[in-house]
Amino acid sequence: MGEQRNTLLGVGVRSGLEAEYQARAGVVYVRDPDDEEQAAVRVSPARWSRFLASVKADQFVPQQEGDEVTIAIGDLSHTEVVQRPSFVTTSRHAWEIFVKAVKSSEFDHLGA
């Protein structure tokens, strides 16, 4: 999978992982756009900031099984009538590229 980058106001995409801040709801949505069946994970701006800081400090360790990486970050999954997952599942490659992007501050503008 080649590296893809698309940055819009409130959106960050890096080769398989996408995060979007919706100011009206005050929520960061995180998903793997390659997995159409997986719903976006809802994350509060405070949790998003802590998550980015822990990734930058190499303190966040996702669950990994083979090439599958599970990132448990959703803290708002219980706030809707239709429950959303509290985790995102993606590939090891997409996670590694996401980590590089986080360390380059490419997602810092979301939820700020």
Image (tube, grey):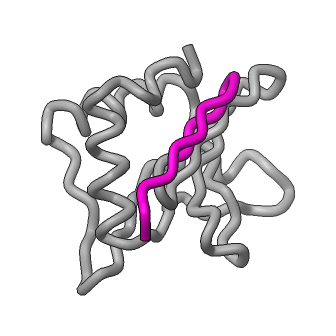
Q: Residue at x 68, y 52 (%)?
A: 78
Residue at the front extreme, as displayed: 2
- 77 vs 52, left or right, is right
How far across and down, in percent of the image, does residue 95 sit?
34, 59
In the image, residue 11 sits, relative to residue 83, either above or below, namely above
The C terminus appears in which quarter of the rendering? top right
**Near-viewer residue (31 or 100):** 100
Q: Residue at x 48, y 23 (%)?
A: 46
Tell me if 8 is positioned left or right of 111 in this view. Answer: right
Quadrant, the N terminus: bottom left
Whether residue 75 is visible here, answered yes or no, is no
Image vertical order of residue 28 relative to residue 76, above or below: above
- Which residue is the extreme one toward the bottom? 66
Q: Position of residue 27 (x, y in %)?
A: 68, 32
What residue is rendered at 46% in x and 29% in y? 107
Q: Quadrant of residue 93?
A: bottom left
Span colored in magenta: 1-13
**Residue drawn at point x = 20 percent, y = 55 percent:** 61
Residue 74's place in the image compared with 7, above or below, is below
Q: Position of residue 102 (x, y in %)?
A: 34, 35
Q: Position of residue 50 (x, y in %)?
A: 35, 28
Direction from residue 72 to residue 58 in the image, left or right: left
Q: Please say if 27 is above or below 34.
A: above
